[in-house]
Amino acid sequence: MNKPIPTLILIVDDDRTVRNGISDMLSQQGYVILQSETAEAAYALITRQMPDLIIMNVVLPGMDGYAFCQQLRQNPDTRLLPIILQVCQGDLADRMAGFKVGANDYITLPYPPEELLYRVKNLLSLTQKPVPPQVQSHTPGRITAIFAAKGGVGKTIICTNLAVALRQISGKRVALMDADYSFGLVGVHLNMSTTHNIMELIPIIDDLDQNAFQNVMVHHISGIHVLLCPFHPEEAELVTAPHIKKVLQLLVEQYDEVVVDCHGSYDERTLEVLEMANTILLIIVPEIGTLMSTSRFLDLVTKLKIPPERLKLVLNRSDSKVGLEVADIERALKYKISYKLVSGGREVTISANKGIPMVTSTPNHPLSLGIKQIAEDLLKP
């Protein structure tokens, strides 16, 4: 039997101590390491032996990390080479510049070794071709739509963590679809900078087969498969309600659980998701503007004749002391609240900035436990 080819990682940093430290840690995980102290020397190495991933400091003698990243992206042979940039602590401009020149991920100095290891494993998993789920004759998967009538209520945080929690608890095949076609943030919250997204399916929507579909699904390190929104917001108009219906039909054929992060509008595409969903989780917070928008949405639900048992209210930030009690909210909306989630506080911001779901990074946080409870209830027969 042939031995598997080891993963080759190139470290580019002019500090020998830093290079050796990273090399020692990754070598212990079974990776093969190449080192270089300049971009020019690194490029010469790449022409002789193509690595599977590059970890590179933005500050280098001669050509800096940004220019080198841009050069690699302009070369067809290295255009898709995964790149992690090391940037200065707290320098947002460095991080934004890195993404603009094509870096896949960044990590701020200094960092704990386990964070770099997580990012390496995650990025390598994203760039590997997803393994198609084993499709067998089975009951179609369930669709859980996550919707909010007003932005800023934590919808995407809940959605991404719920999908990962469903996978953690059940081990089932879980798909996550970003249906906020203009400004979806699922990829950001899961640290996915790949360009694979739903737009690749639109030209072939009538002739989709399993292989073509799976080539677009992005594999996350948690085990869930993700269908991202269009990379360019102006492309969103090309996605229509019939497209969404077809995509959801394919998803429930191949996955046991399908979680959809809905756009916060009542257009035909969102209504298609809501009408096909087995469960709609409506996210609210104790704030008067959100409750007014939610009340109007509940009126629409009645007009659409969506069965009330399919709709469950989730009160996020339920521990906020803002003068609105649960009983007040239920009385105003004439609807019972099914779940109460506490504020995530600082941990939510850290989770979003790092692209690591809270159910993974801080599994015992009260917010993580609350989301896991929703996942357990959804999994009940």
Image: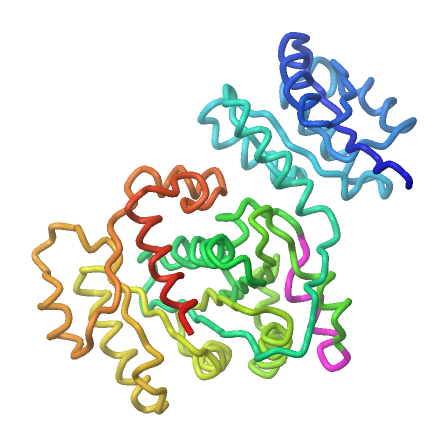
What residue lies at 85% left-to-right and 32% top-to-bottom? Answer: 50
Residue 130 in percent (x, y) is at 71, 55
Q: Looking at the picture, does residue 217 appear above or below residue 279?
A: above
Q: Quadrant of the N terminus?
A: top right
Classified by dominant secondary structure, the portion drawn in magenta counts as helix
Magenta stretch, residue numbers: 195-207
- Observer-nearest residue: 357 or 204? 357
Q: Is residue 199 magenta?
A: yes
Residue 146 in percent (x, y) is at 40, 67
Residue 240 seen in the current view? no
Q: Is residue 179 left or right of residue 238?
A: left
Quadrant position of residue 19: top right
What residue lies at 16% left-to-right and 50% top-to-bottom? Answer: 320
Q: Is residue 311 magenta?
A: no
Quadrant position of residue 372: bottom left
Residue 248 in percent (x, y) is at 58, 76
Residue 205 seen in the current view? yes
Q: Is residue 172 left or right of residue 210?
A: left
Rendered image coloring scheme:
rainbow
- Observer-nearest residue: 51 or 204? 51
Residue 31 in percent (x, y) is at 73, 27
Q: Looking at the picture, does residue 119 appear above or below residue 161?
A: above
Q: Quadrant of the C terminus?
A: bottom left
- Observer-nearest residue: 242 or 136? 136
- Count of marks placed on residues: 0
